[in-house]
Amino acid sequence: MRHIKIYLILIILLILPAIVFAGESAIFTWNPNTETDLAGYRLYQSAVSGQYTFGAASAVADITAGTETVSLENVPDGTWYWVLTAYDASGHESGPSNEVTLAIDTTPPDSPTGLSAIIQRIVSFFRSIFGGLRLG
């Protein structure tokens, strides 16, 4: 019984990372803003092209100045539109960057169809090869 518990714990430890880290990642890069009072960047996501609600509360990521890349984990299925803005120490936010589109597809393919099977006797194959062979 003790061995079963140990094996179950090991199986759970092996499977758990696959469950926790399932999903797609989106990695964004950009050219840095060179203004001296730059405080950071905000990344926005929308399901509809060109329709964003701007402001700190609506951003999917608030990125510190000096950063030129960000990765978002577990992006859900669908087509998503993204823009980036810069903001300064006074809280002024720039207009949006160019829009990028990402289509995330984590849907598995359809199941195969038309599977069939037959039973074939291998014995009959050997009988036909060795049928005329006599020992002794």
Image: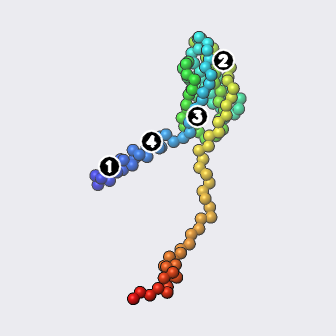
Q: Position of residue 125 (x, y in %)?
A: 52, 78
Q: Is residue 47 above or below residue 126?
A: above
Quarter occupied by the C terminus: bottom left
Label 3 neighbour load within 10 Å: few <14, some 14-19, many 20+ = few
- 9 displayed left or right of 116: left
Q: Earlier in the sequence, mark 2 or mark 3?
A: 3
Q: Amino acid at mark 3?
A: Ala
Q: Position of residue 82 (x, y in %)?
A: 65, 30
Is the image coloured rainbow, by chain, by secondary structure, or in one colour?
rainbow
Query: Do the CB atoms of the residues marked 2 and 4 lie less than 8 Å apart?
Result: no
Tag on residue 26?
3
Regarding mark 1 in the picture, which secondary structure is present there? helix
Q: Earlier in the sequence, mark 1 or mark 2?
A: 1
Query: Would you name the residue on which mark 2 appears?
Result: 94
Q: How many marks?
A: 4
Spatial distance from mark 2 to mark 3, Cα to Cα?
23 Å
Regarding mark 4 in the picture, which secondary structure is present there? helix
Seen from this angle, which residue lies furthest front?
136
Spatial distance from mark 4 to mark 1, Cα to Cα?
18 Å
